Image (tube, grey):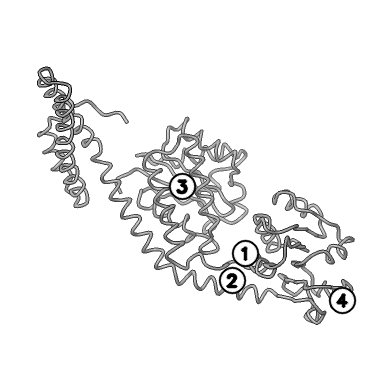
């Protein structure tokens, strides 16, 4: 691909969480890095993408500027020894590699959970920051809009995004299914292990729940998660019984060797309608006989894992189809970049023809009436556009055949394009 697009990537594939979190960027720092790279390094077509799984910087420059970019990143983070982290970075120094990688990332092919849709929203947000910072050139605009169009095709033409392929997201889908007929359902999450915390984040993103309540032995952890999720309510363990009575769904992620929720405890809740218990713990934190309590239904991690595994299997089966769609989009982008190479000569041809047209109009319009002048203007403009269109079509066809060079040279002589001034876009 004839464009100097490149990328610097740090992802979960090579870097452990301890490294990724040190180099992760929040929104203000993403925007700050964009400004630094744009203003101090004079880079263009910039995209800064930072999530829990990756920190990546995309840019356009004829030279490899990765070292300067990583120095700017390390300076921004402060007290980071760049040399320690260099082995974890991947450098994509060709447009083919960088664009293909961004497609894989945005489609969810390069995600920890294959087909993860959240990453496409994160790419869209990163692109908006680039546009706001005036750091996106014609190539990046075209690339990202091609990616968004491709994403829609993947969504509508394949089963790649169907179902929940992670345990935490599968748990969320199960909660939504169980509470579909309940107005403003109340959800109680007890124990904030890794999966339980992820479920809370998913619940917080949904608007259909009346209330999401957290309960954890370590209050500081609950407070941190509640703040991250936009202020979920926290209760103490001493108040758990009352919260259990109010909840429509109880999600347990308690780490202990024996069940916390026993039949006796649940039976004392006086369940008047259905109450759903979802056990995300291994070993189980909800005793098997709890389901014998009238009105209580229990779902364990195996049921949720089965749901997630089935979705993952469907997604993996759809990957070849996704890759075919991506290949079609990349081919179209490649054609566009080739056509961009001849865009300056097209503009010069247009300027040359317009100059000739105006010179001839000046000769004849002096003797013409107003009506004749208007007719002359319309006729010559139409003729010019037809001549130009014919040459443009030949040029674009030559680009696809990798034969544009000779035609550009011939047209340059024919229209004396060397004498034409450079077109400033």
| Distance of label 2 from label 3 (alpha carbons) | 32 Å
Q: Residue at x 16, y 40 (%)?
A: 386
- Contact? badges 2 and 3 (CB < 8 Å): no
Q: Is residue 330 left or right of residue 177?
A: left
Q: Is residue 54 left or right of residue 270?
A: left
| Distance of label 4 from label 1 (alpha carbons) | 29 Å
Q: Which residue does the numbered mark 1 point to in the structure image?
A: 169
Q: Which residue does the numbered mark 4 point to in the structure image?
A: 267
Nearer the observer, 416 or 44: 416
Q: Residue at x 79, y 65 (%)?
A: 247
- Contact? badges 2 and 4 (CB < 8 Å): no
Q: Is residue 364 left or right of residue 331?
A: left
Q: Is residue 372 above or below residue 285?
A: above
Sequence order check: which comes first, mark 1 or mark 2?
A: 1
Q: Residue at x 30, y 28 (%)?
A: 424
> Where's residue 153, x and y in %?
42, 60
Sequence order check: which comes first, mark 1 or mark 3?
A: 3
Q: Which residue does the numbered mark 3 point to in the structure image?
A: 8
> Where's residue 238, x and y in %?
90, 61
């Amino acid at each position: 691909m004839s464009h100097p697009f490149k990328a610097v990537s740090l992802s979960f594939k090579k870097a452990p969480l301890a490294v990724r979190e040190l180099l992760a960027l929040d929104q203000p720092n993403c925007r700050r890095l964009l400004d630094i790279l744009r203003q101090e390094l004079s880079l263009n077509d910039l995209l800064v993408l930072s999530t829990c799984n990756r920190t990546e910087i995309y840019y356009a420059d004829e030279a490899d500027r990765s070292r300067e970019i990583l120095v700017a990143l390390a300076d921004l983070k402060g007290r980071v020894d760049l040399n320690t982290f260099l082995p974890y970075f991947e450098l994509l120094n060709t447009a083919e590699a960088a664009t293909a990688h961004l497609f894989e990332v945005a489609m969810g092919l390069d995600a920890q959970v294959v087909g993860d849709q959240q990453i496409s929203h994160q790419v869209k947000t990163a692109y908006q920051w680039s546009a706001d910072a005036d750091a996106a050139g014609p190539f990046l605009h075209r690339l990202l809009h091609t990616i968004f169009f491709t994403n829609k095709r993947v969504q509508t033409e394949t089963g790649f995004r169907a179902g929940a392929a992670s345990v935490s997201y599968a748990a969320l889908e199960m909660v939504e299914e169980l509470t579909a007929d309940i107005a403003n359902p109340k959800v109680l999450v007890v124990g904030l292990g890794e999966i339980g915390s992820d479920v809370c984040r998913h619940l917080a993103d949904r608007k259909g729940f009346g209330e999401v309540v957290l309960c954890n032995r370590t209050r500081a952890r609950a407070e941190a998660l509640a703040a991250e999720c936009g202020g979920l309510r926290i209760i103490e363990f001493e108040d758990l019984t009352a919260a259990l009575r109010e909840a429509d769904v109880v999600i347990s992620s308690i780490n202990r060797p024996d069940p916390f929720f026993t039949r006796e405890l649940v039976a004392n809740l006086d369940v008047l309608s259905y109450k759903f218990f979802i056990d995300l713990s291994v070993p189980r934190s909800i005793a098997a006989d709890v389901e014998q309590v009238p009105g209580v239904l229990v779902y364990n991690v195996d049921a949720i894992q089965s749901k997630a595994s089935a979705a993952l299997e469907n997604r993996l089966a759809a990957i070849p189809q996704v890759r075919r769609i991506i290949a079609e989009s990349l081919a179209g982008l490649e054609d566009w970049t080739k056509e961009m190479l001849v865009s300056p000569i097209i503009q010069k041809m247009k300027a040359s023809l317009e100059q000739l047209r105006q010179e001839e109009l000046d000769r004849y319009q002096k003797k013409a009436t107003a009506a004749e002048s208007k007719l002359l203007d319309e006729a010559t403009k139409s003729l010019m556009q037809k001549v130009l269109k014919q040459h443009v079509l030949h040029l674009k066809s030559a680009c696809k055949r990798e034969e544009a060079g000779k035609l550009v040279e011939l047209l340059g002589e024919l229209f004396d394009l060397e004498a034409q001034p450079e077109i400033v876009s």
